Image (cartoon, helix red, strand yellow):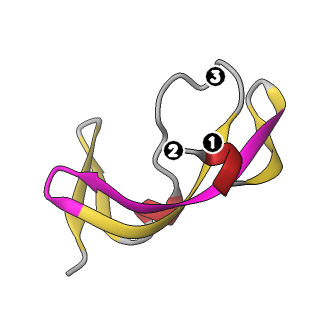
Amino acid sequence: IDYRVNGQPVSVSTASGVAQAWRIKLDSVKIGAIEVLGVEAAVVQGDAPTEVLLGMSFLGRVRWREEQGMLLLESKL
């Protein structure tokens, strides 16, 4: 992801404080058989978080529920 060329610089609040980030639009995000096109995202500068986090720009476009500590995703189609 060439976020510094295609992204828009923004400041974001994290658990560690304010950080520099870049707003981008991903062509698609695919998890298993579920694919969502045109997902807004942010790439945060720095070492944290080390995991990729799913935001509401993705989760708002699928059905999801928590069951026994697991997040279950289903297509809305």
* Cα separation between marks 3 and 2: 18 Å
Magenta residues, dominant SS class: strand
Q: In the current view of this chain or complex, which residue is farthest to the front?
A: 5
Given residues 60 and 11, the one toward you in this image is 11
Residue corresponding to mark 3: 48
* Cα separation between marks 3 and 1: 11 Å
Which residue shows up at 68% across the image and 50% down it? Answer: 5
Determine whether, in the image, residue 9 is placed left or right of residue 75.
right
The range drawn in magenta is: 19-34
Residue corresponding to mark 1: 43
* Cα separation between marks 1 and 2: 9 Å
Q: Quadrant of the C terminus?
A: bottom left
Which residue shows up at 16% across the image and 50% down it? Answer: 32
| Label 1 environment density (alpha carbons within 10 Å; few <14, some 14–19, many ≥20) | some
Place of residue 11 in the rendered image (x, y in percent of width and height, measured from the top left): 84, 45
Place of residue 21 in the rendered image (x, y in percent of width and height, measured from the top left): 74, 42
Q: In the current view of this chain or complex, which residue is farthest to the left?
A: 33
As helix, strand or loop, the secondary structure at mark 2 comes to loop
Q: Is the Cβ of the residue at disc 1 closer than 8 Å to that at disc 2? A: yes
Determine whether, in the image, residue 56 is placed left or right of residue 33.
right
| Label 3 environment density (alpha carbons within 10 Å; few <14, some 14–19, many ≥20) | few
Which residue shows up at 47% across the image and 27% down it? Answer: 51
| Above or below, 70 relative to 7 | above
Residue type pointed to by label 2: Ile
